[in-house]
Image (cartoon, rainbow, N blue to C red):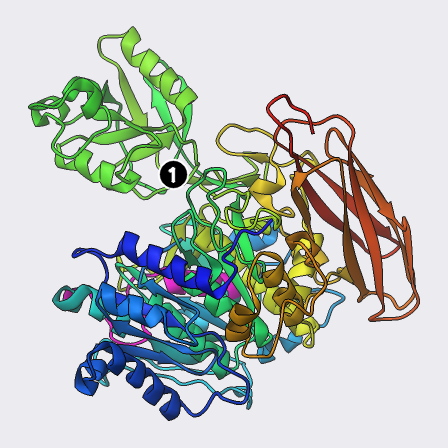
Amino acid sequence: MASSPGSAMFFLLFSLVLLGELCCCSCSQVFVVYMGKGLQGDSGSHRDILRLHHQMLTDVHDGSLEKAQASHVYTYSRGFQGFAAKLSKEQAMKLAEMPGVVSVFPNTKRNLHTTHSWDFMGLSTNAEAGVPGLYTKNQENVIVGFIDTGIWPESPSFSDHGMPPVPKRWRGQCQRGEANSPSNFTCNRKIIGGRYYLNGFQTEEGGSSTSAVKFISPRDSSGHGSHTASIAAGRFVRNMNFGGLGTGGGRGGAPMARIAVYKACWDSGCYDVDILAAFDDAISDGVNIISVSLGPDYPQGDYFSDAISIGSFHAMSNGILVVSSAGNAGRQGSATNLAPWMLTVAAGTTDRSFVSYIRLANGTFVMGESLSTYHMNTSIRTISASTANAGYFTPYQSSFCLDSSLNRTKARGKILICRHTESSSASHVSTSMVVKKAGAAGMILIDEMGDHVANHFALPATAVGKAMGDKILSYTKSTRHASTMILPAKTFLGSRDAPRVAAFSSRGPSSLTPEILKPDVAAPGLNILAAWSPAKNDMHFNILSGTSMACPHVTGIAALVKSVYPSWSPSAIKSAIMTTATVLDNKRKPMTTDPDGRTATPFDFGSGFMDPVKALNPGIIFDAQPEDYKTFLCAIGYDDHSLHLITGYNSTCTDRAPSSATALNYPSITIPYLKKSYSVIRTMTNVGNPRGAYRAVVSAPRGINVTVTPEVLVFEKYGEKKTFTVSFHVDVPPPGYVFGNFTWHGRHARLMMQLAVKVQTDDKGLI
């Protein structure tokens, strides 16, 4: 079933509808004009392309070249073609109608979505040597690009000690910023490139942008970029900790890989036009992997009206794998970064917690979670914030500890019990600041989300789930002078079964192409310790949670896989990581999800929780080339003209055999509209022992009969390809999606493919 625009006319209509919906006097007036790859043999020099863009802008500025040049923000010409410009709604609509334009869309702001985590996944934290039995020392030739908030080059995580000279193939730059100023930035043999992109941000935010920009250089002022880069490729740091918590050696997944920085994100967010400029440069500079810990809000727009999808498509076409975060909305169907040519990562947990106990005066201990290490010397009177309401605020409103909702006289010197629900807009930390401002001595936050995210609060405080919160409230109601003591946070290992899928992690199914299972894989994303920018809070390391942290874990392993198999395509690396993932926790039980503890499904974790060691020796891969993605685009409704513009080649859909989105050689299978019977073909490539046999073992979704033909595949040489068919037949129509998997068992390797099936029925439940 088509789930993206089809004809060139549909492109135009889509652009016009989007412009009509999003343009108003208060909305962005900067637009991206995306022109695909550019016609083969007609790419021209950057100067020629810039001249073409100025001419197009002149045409919509009533013939004024001066106005056209003044409106121009960026030209994209290295990895793909297009430009960004400040336009009126009418001018944008005229550009959307011009020949060669694929799409026109507003410049949208995107949101930025450890030591122990690598130990938990089976990689030694205290070394950089590699993985036993596999030669991973080629890391020094792998270049990882990070589109983020920049980097703090002086961090010990980015030392170039002992690293060889920069690879000669590197074509990037090091933009130093202003000399002899705090903004000054220096590259080394670890951080081999640094660029920054400010045009889109400044055009959108105008005069207000000056105070929001601390460093006009690739230097990181917010910490997010340093954090993600060190998770993926940070050097070994002997004593990494956060205020004494999580103390131990820390390193990235590929500690000897090179880092290239593309600072497209500023303290207030990341704009599309800057993100596209970063992709354009990264593709030309010669990176091998691009890590993108940011994304759109859900529901995501069409693939080619989305900056990250566009940039990653052209990266893939140039042999570069893009790893992205799935988002932090935590709801079914909320996953973003949905393009099949990207590797999309969900967030899971490790077995490490940062625990802060609450001691009730009756002797009971309740476990909470916090990063605060404040010491209380005695128990303190504890009340519900609902009893400390101020002014016109109701007790219910003050129970959330909203700004100005607390009566200072009632709150002073006490521990307040506050509530936080899914609908709460304030963060945990900002809530603690409100409580501190009211004069309270501490806070117990009942977090009904139960996401287990540890925070450093503004005063002695800890967060508990609803069940523990109810227990504390029951205690306070049982006595007139309830008192508690909040103990300082400590690091605990093995306190919970893990991995689990984090409560905040966005879920599938894909809202764009439900035939593609998203997210692709899960990795550690809860309470991750990594490098930080001391420009933010004067800290060198910090603990953060989010799919932003899960993404670089996969990026690091992708870099390791690339170091072992330099010639592999992006989809081959992606396949190795997906098919070797696990769906079991450390107790060998099915993985569960926070906060409710239900059994997780592929819509939660994709193919499973990443296993770095197995990913380096998958035995079999499911490969896909740019041609296969062109066929995919035809299958979901793109026509010859659209495909021609996007790819730059004389590709046609009419020359290709009729297909569906499920035909893409993806490492998982999703059938969202099953009617009685359906078959899917996949092709495996042998990358293990030259000779070997694999047998299929099926765990079918409930109510569905699944057969694999042939059941046994025998390989005679390395690189040999074998095709098999997976047939689905409805036995008893189940409601909604049902899940299963099948595993190819070999002597030296084992790989799993996830199955997601939904039977299409009528109102009576009949097929």
Q: Answer whether residue 303 is magenta in the image.
A: no
Q: Residue 601 occupies which quadrant of the picture?
A: top right
Seen at 32% across and 44% down, the residue is 456
Q: Which image quadrant: the C terminus?
A: top right
Percent position of residue 470, x then y: 37, 17
Percent position of residue 539, x then y: 31, 59
Seen at 35% across and 50% down, the residue is 243
- In this figure, what is the number of numbered marks? 1
Count neighbours of disc 1 (C-alpha within 10 A) and say few if under 14, some if 14 to 19, many if 20 or more. Answer: many
Percent position of residue 555, x then y: 55, 63
22 over 626 or under it: above or below: above
Q: Return the residue nearer the eye: 57 or 581.
A: 57
Q: Answer whether residue 212 is magenta in the image.
A: yes
Q: Residue 738 occupies which quadrant of the picture?
A: top right
- Is any atom of residue 89 visible in this view? yes
Q: Return the residue nearer the eye: 404 or 758.
A: 758
- Is any atom of residue 151 visible in this view? no
Q: Is residue 181 left or right of residue 525?
A: left
The secondary element bearing badge 1 is classed as loop
Percent position of residue 680, x then y: 76, 50
Q: Is residue 163 left or right of residue 53?
A: right
605 over 88 or under it: above or below: above
Q: Which residues are magenta?
A: 211-232
Seen at 26% across and 18% down, the residue is 483
Q: Is residue 605 left or right of residue 246?
A: right
91 over 391 or under it: above or below: below
Which amino acid does the dot numbered 1 rest on?
Ala
Q: Return the residue nearer the eye: 137 or 73.
A: 73
Q: Residue 735 occupies which quadrant of the picture?
A: top right
Q: Which residue is mark 1?
A: 489
401 over 282 or under it: above or below: above
